Image: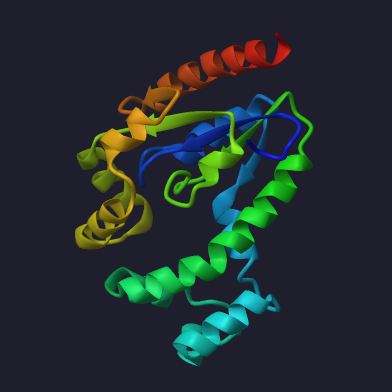
Amino acid sequence: MHAAKNYIVGLTGGIGSGKSAAADIFRSLGVQIVNADELSREVVAVGQPALEEIAEHFGRNILSTEGSLDRAALRKIIFSDREAKAWLENLLHPLIAKLLQERLTETSSAYTILESPLLFETEQHKFVDRVLVIDVDEQTQLSRAMARDGSDKAVIQSIIAAQISRDERIRRADDVVSNEGNLNQLKEHIEALHDHYRGIVTT
């Protein structure tokens, strides 16, 4: 069980599923969002001890000319080197989890959304009361992610392969929203869930 006093809904889904769009809709309804990706960038910001540890481990070439983390360079390394990926996760995941718990205790909306692409993989599901999965098929993931990021198909496929399987993600969800349609359809689903979640926390 999480340490936060309010009700926490974990929002997750594969790359290109529309998690961020769903989070934006919740935000427009007055729900506070804690974004795990943003916290992961925070712990490796310039001046943070973790950034120096990463530079010492992987070499100074992992830094940009401004001294910040070159995330694209790091991503290339960890997707081709399991040991490097494990080392990085062992360093960052506890730091992110600690920051996550702090931020979740600071929220004041009726319930809070924890937006995390790796909710299960990083065991962040332990901090939530309920899990909402935004779901699309793999072909939709590929086309959306390639259009959004400009990445090639192989890179997106490697990211999908590194995440929990679609079937497992759905199996572990409390709520699943199919996002194969348009933004208005997603908005309708999220608004219905918002009413449902508010009903849960007020009973």
Q: In this view, does 122 lie above or below 198?
A: below
Q: Is residue 142 above or below residue 197?
A: below
Which residue occupies the extreme front position in the image? 1
Q: How many marks?
A: 0
Residue 130: give x, y in percent of width and height. Answer: 54, 27
Residue displayed at 65% across by 24% down: 29
Could you tell whether 195 is left or right of 88 in the image?
A: right
Residue 203: give x, y in percent of width and height. Answer: 70, 8
Colouring convention used in this rendered image of the protein: rainbow
Could you tell whether 144 is left or right of 132 in the image?
A: left
Quadrant holding the N terminus: top right
Residue 173: give x, y in percent of width and height. Answer: 42, 28
Residue displayed at 54% across by 54% down: 37
Residue displayed at 30% across by 61% down: 151
Residue displayed at 40% across by 24% down: 176
- Determine if residue 72 is in view: no
Residue 14: give x, y in percent of width and height. Answer: 36, 43
Could you tell whether 107 is left or right of 195 in the image?
A: right
**Residue 129 quadrant:** top right
**Residue 58 quadrant:** bottom left
Q: Is residue 155 above or below residue 9?
A: below
- Determine if residue 177 is in view: yes
User: Closer to the camera, 80 or 63?
Assistant: 80
**Residue 150 quadrant:** bottom left
